[in-house]
Image: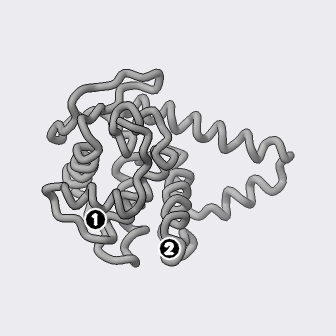
Amino acid sequence: MANNAFTPDSFKSLTDQSPVPFNETYHKALFAQYVMETNNGTSNLFINHSNLFGMRPALSREKHYASVYESANGPFAHYDSPTYSVIDRMALDESLGTVPPTNEHDILRYMDEVLQKCYSGCPEEPHYLGAWIDAFNGVYPSMRLNIEDRSDLPSHQEDADFLSGLPSWSKIAIPLIGIASLLVFLKKKNVF
């Protein structure tokens, strides 16, 4: 696949090709996940494997990928086109029983539900959710999601309080360790 990152409009045209109906809010939530997972279309998985969401081979859902790419981080799905990656991501929601968002106020609930079902028990859940929200806010600044608006979701304030008393170098090292831990966990779990 060529190194062509999607825009919200080109991603929408991609999702419009999907046989599963897409609502505008679901489209926005998945586009933000695509931006986060592929570093806005620059990742190896996106460029060489048409994998928009870091999807792993299916363990129990229907197979929509063409083959499996074996990487140092474990197996990932390889798709013939980005459309199949979108279909597989939607199939994941369906197999998990995840209810896609239907309005702007429902997006945080959806993101949290995906994380609870895909990353349950992972100590980096709040960081993944924060990264997803940051990607969403970067693409759709007028909608501006804020995790603190949901008292039932993990708060980043605890992380900020913990980091405030540490030396400056640790404020970089701790998140990097967290990211490494998340990658190890995901590799072991084969969640995607």
Residue 186 position in % (x across, y down)? 44, 35
Q: What is the crowding at mark 2: few (fewer than 14 residues within 10 Å), some, or many (at least 20)?
A: few
Measure how far apart labels 2 and 1 are at the Cα level.
Answer: 18 Å
| Tag 2: amino acid | Arg
Residue at 41 percent across and 48 percent down: it is 120
Label 2: element kind: loop
Specify the quadrant that holds the N terminus: top left
Residue 36 position in % (x across, y down)? 49, 51
- Which residue matches tag 1? 100
Q: Residue furthest right?
A: 167
Residue 64 position in % (x across, y down)? 18, 39
> Could you tell whether 89 is left or right of 131 in the image?
left
Residue at 13 percent across and 56 percent down: it is 19
- Which residue matches tag 2? 150
Residue 137 position in % (x across, y down)? 53, 67
Residue at 25 percent across and 54 percent down: it is 93
| 66 lies above or below 123 | above
